[in-house]
Amino acid sequence: RFLRSVPFSPQILFFSTRPVIAALRDVQVSVPPAVRRGDTATLHCYYDMDGESLYSVKWYKGRREFYRYTPKESPPMKIFPAQGVQVKRSASNESQLTLLGLSLASSGKYSCEVSADAPSFHTMIVTGDLEVCEVPKHVPSIHGMRSRYRVGDIVRGNCTSHNSRPPANLTWYINEAQANPSYIRTHKPFRERKNEFETSLAGIHFVVGNHHFVNGKLKIRCTARIHDIYLQSTERSIDEDRPRVISAASSANSNGKGANGNAVPYDHFPPYAENELDRKDYMTLQGELEHIAY
């Protein structure tokens, strides 16, 4: 056998010494999700130019540009009109934007657009949602409950939080623990006739058991919450209404009968009394709705 010779051919390898092209990256926006009406909000736009020069930062509400920062121009800051937007110049720059006197019209989507300078003019845009809230002027109110209950009685009550936007989320608690969902009667929030605000209503309905009373007390609380900017509660402390034992001697003195007389051992309500209490002194769910709506 003969070995076939392969002619040697030298290879030339080329190595690029050109640096990797820098590029804008990691653009992020920080927008507070909820703010009280009339308050100030600060929005942030974070970005990494990665060696490039900044050309401009623009802010939009929806599709409308209302703020532009161009460092190579003089002045670098420009502000354009937009509904519900009032910019605080002294607290705004290429990475921060401060809005004053927020109104309900200020709610919406806010976008930050960052552009690199020549030659790439690379552009990225990110968006965040801001909601301006009208919080209730008063704490939630509890209606329809008596001050005393016995084991076996039915507790019925309503919790109302008036005039907010969005409507408050209502939560019932019994002795510091969130109430069993089966006890709760939920109702759709309704809009007030005199304004654009809404009212929340939630009912509670359960049979009183021995375990509900702690040292003769039953505590029921209703909490109203709107995002993380509003939290108020109202609590009722209810006494246990235990039957009172009447001694035979007292009974004999009061009705003229002896120890073997026909004495009543417990001080009971008349059979009609509880219905009278509910009918005269306490609002039913329907009555509460009528009271609020009208």
Image (spheres, rainbow, N blue to C red):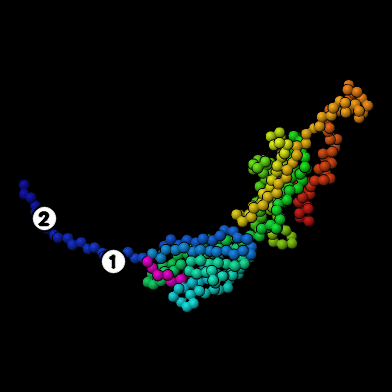
Q: Is residue 252 left or right of residue 70?
A: right
Quadrant of residue 157 within the rendered picture: top right
The secondary structure making up most of the magenta span is strand
Residue that badge 1 annotates: 18
Q: Identify the residue at horizontal 72%, vertical 62% (top origin).
A: 195
Residue 57 lies within the magenta run: yes
Residue 205 lies within the magenta run: no
* C-alpha gap between disc 1 and disc 2: 36 Å
Residue situated in front as seen by the camera: 275 or 247: 247
Q: Is the residue marked by circle 2 packed among few (<14), some (14-19), or many (20+) residues within 10 Å?
A: few
Q: How many marks?
A: 2
Residue that badge 2 annotates: 6
Which of marks 2 and 1 precedes in the sequence? 2
Q: Look at the image and tell me in which quarter the C terminus lies.
A: bottom right
The amino acid pointed to by label 2 is: Val
Q: Position of residue 124 (x, y in %)?
A: 45, 65
Q: Which residues are magenta?
A: 51-58
Q: Identify the residue at horizontal 88%, vertical 28% (top origin).
A: 250
- In the image, residue 65 sits, relative to residue 250, either above or below, namely below
Q: Identify the residue at horizontal 22%, vertical 63% (top origin).
A: 14
Q: Is residue 181 visible?
A: no
Q: Position of residue 112 (x, y in %)?
A: 50, 65
Q: Is residue 130 left or right of residue 162?
A: left
- In the image, residue 222 sits, relative to residue 249, either above or below, namely below
